């Protein structure tokens, strides 16, 4: 059922998402029923090297069942953008954070 959802319904859910966003998107799944070979194969094709889960290219971190993309990726990515060059003032810091977001 899960593989069927991935094949037949996920694309409908992503239909209105801009293509540039879809290309930057990561897929997370962690429930044991989602570990089937069929599901993992589909995720490898649809989200190559961009899915997080058991048996995937990015392992689900130990003891982190509630991990979400903000914890896993966003905050570190924003820091990389914001602090790419020295910051002269609080105003510049605020502007960079807003621009990065």
Image (cartoon, rainbow, N blue to C red):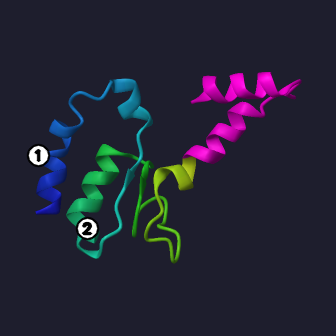
Q: Nearer the viewer, residue 39 or 101?
A: 101
Q: Which mark is residue 76?
A: none
Q: Which mark is residue 34?
A: 2
**Mark 1 — residue?**
8
Q: Quadrant of residue 56?
A: bottom left
Within 10 angstroms of label 2, few (less than 14), some, or many (20 or more) residues?
some
Name the chief secondary structure element in magenta.
helix
Q: Quadrant of residue 10?
A: top left
Magenta segment: does it hold 96? Answer: yes
Cα–Cα gap, marks 1 and 2:
16 Å
Within 10 angstroms of label 1, few (less than 14), some, or many (20 or more) residues?
few
Q: Position of residue 88 (x, y in %)?
A: 89, 24
Q: Earlier in the sequence, mark 1 or mark 2?
A: 1
Magenta segment: does it hold 3? Answer: no
Looking at the image, residue 4 lies above or below residue 35: above
Looking at the image, residue 58 lies above or below residue 27: below
* Residue at x 40% of width, y 64% of height: 53
Q: Position of residue 73 (x, y in %)?
A: 56, 49
Quadrant in which the N terminus is drawn? bottom left
In the visual, does 69 lie left or right of 30?
right
* Residue at x 56% of width, y 44% of height: 74
- Badge 1 marks a residue whose secondary structure is helix
Q: Which residues are magenta?
A: 74-101
């Amino acid at each position: 059922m899960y593989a069927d959802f991935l094949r037949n319904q996920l694309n409908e859910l992503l239909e209105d998402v801009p293509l540039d966003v879809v290309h930057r998107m990561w897929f997370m799944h962690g429930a044991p029923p989602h570990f089937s070979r069929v599901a993992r194969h589909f995720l490898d094709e649809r989200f190559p090297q961009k899915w997080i889960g058991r048996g995937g290219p990015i392992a689900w971190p130990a003891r982190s069942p509630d991990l979400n993309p903000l914890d896993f990726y966003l905050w570190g990515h924003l820091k990389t953008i914001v602090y790419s060059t020295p910051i002269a003032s609080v105003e510049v810091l605020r502007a960079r954070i807003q621009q990065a977001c």
